């Protein structure tokens, strides 16, 4: 208690910001990693150039604001108490440190968002890809072909493009996709 009483009013403000911001930052970070994060957004993105559809975690998010207040308080208190700088430089240093921290937190979450993939297989990407016949494709029927689409090796129903039988193990090329996921294939040249 003696420590708290020895602080000037601005140092008490810095301490309040550091404790409140740090506690909220810690709680939000723990909730984020255990799945309890609601991704609540406080406002815009301060011109950071991120679309709402691209990044659910913008620069001016609750996580960013808590990080700002935590660093604002810590750096401001250190500059005032330890360095003996006046209020103007302590507030300025705290503001700069908080802004940099908020930008770094925003970039971390933007980078994490880029690692996310929805995993939806787009069959149009199969056209032009080469693979092998898994089960013989009869001249007038359906067989099976193994094709790598979007870095996933899958087996699909396949029909021949020029009505000739293609035997198991032969190399094929996808010409088009019909009925959603049936491949029209020809022998690879």
Image: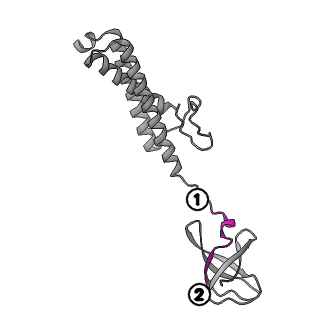
Residue 32 relative to residue 41: left or right: left
First in sequence: mark 1 vs mark 2: 1
Q: Where on the picture, by quarter, is residue 77?
A: top left
Residue 36 in view, yes or no: no
Graded by Cα atoms within 10 Å as few (under 14), some (14 to 19) or many (20 or more), the crowding at tag 1 reads few
Residue 185 relative to residue 11: left or right: right
Q: Position of residue 43 (x, y in %)?
A: 58, 29
Under circle 2, the secondary element is loop
Image vertical order of residue 118 relative to residue 130, above or below: above
Instruction: State the residue at coordinates (72%, 81%).
Output: 159
Asked if the magenta segment contains residue 130, the reply would be: yes
Q: Position of residue 109 (x, y in %)?
A: 48, 42
Asked if the magenta segment contains residue 132, the reply would be: yes
Q: Which residues are magenta?
A: 121-133
Q: How is the image coloured?
A: one colour
Position of the N terminus by quadrant = top left
- Residue carrying label 1: 119
Camera-near label (1 vs 2) is 2
Image vertical order of residue 25 relative to residue 166, above or below: above
- Residue carrying label 2: 169
Q: Are marks 1 and 2 in contact (CB under 8 Å)?
A: no
Instruction: State the residue at coordinates (56%, 35%).
Output: 48
Position of the C terminus by quadrant = bottom right
Under circle 1, the secondary element is loop
Residue 181 relative to residue 104: left or right: right
Graded by Cα atoms within 10 Å as few (under 14), some (14 to 19) or many (20 or more), the crowding at tag 2 reads some
Image vertical order of residue 8 relative to residue 134, above or below: above
Query: What is the CA distance from the residue labelled 1 to the residue labelled 2?
Result: 28 Å
Instruction: State the residue at coordinates (59%, 65%).
Output: 150
């Amino acid at each position: 208690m003696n420590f708290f009483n020895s602080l000037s009013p601005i140092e008490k403000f810095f301490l309040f910001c550091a404790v409140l911001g740090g506690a909220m930052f810690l709680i939000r970070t723990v909730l984020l990693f255990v799945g309890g994060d609601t991704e609540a957004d406080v406002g815009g993105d301060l011109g950071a150039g991120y679309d709402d559809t691209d990044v659910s975690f913008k620069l001016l998010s609750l996580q960013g604001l808590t990080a700002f207040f935590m660093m604002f308080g810590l750096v401001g208190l250190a500059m005032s108490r330890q360095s003996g700088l006046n209020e103007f430089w302590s507030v300025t240093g705290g503001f700069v440190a908080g802004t940099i921290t908020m930008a770094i937190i925003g970039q971390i979450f933007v980078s994490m968002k880029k690692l996310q993939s929805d995993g939806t297989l787009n069959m149009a990407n199969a056209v032009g890809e080469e693979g092998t016949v898994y089960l013989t494709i009869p001249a007038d029927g359906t067989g099976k072909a193994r094709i790598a689409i979007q870095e996933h090796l899958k087996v699909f129903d396949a029909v021949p493009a020029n009505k000739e039988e293609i035997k198991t193990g032969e190399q094929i090329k996808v010409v088009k996709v019909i009925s959603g996921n049936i491949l029209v294939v020809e022998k690879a040249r």
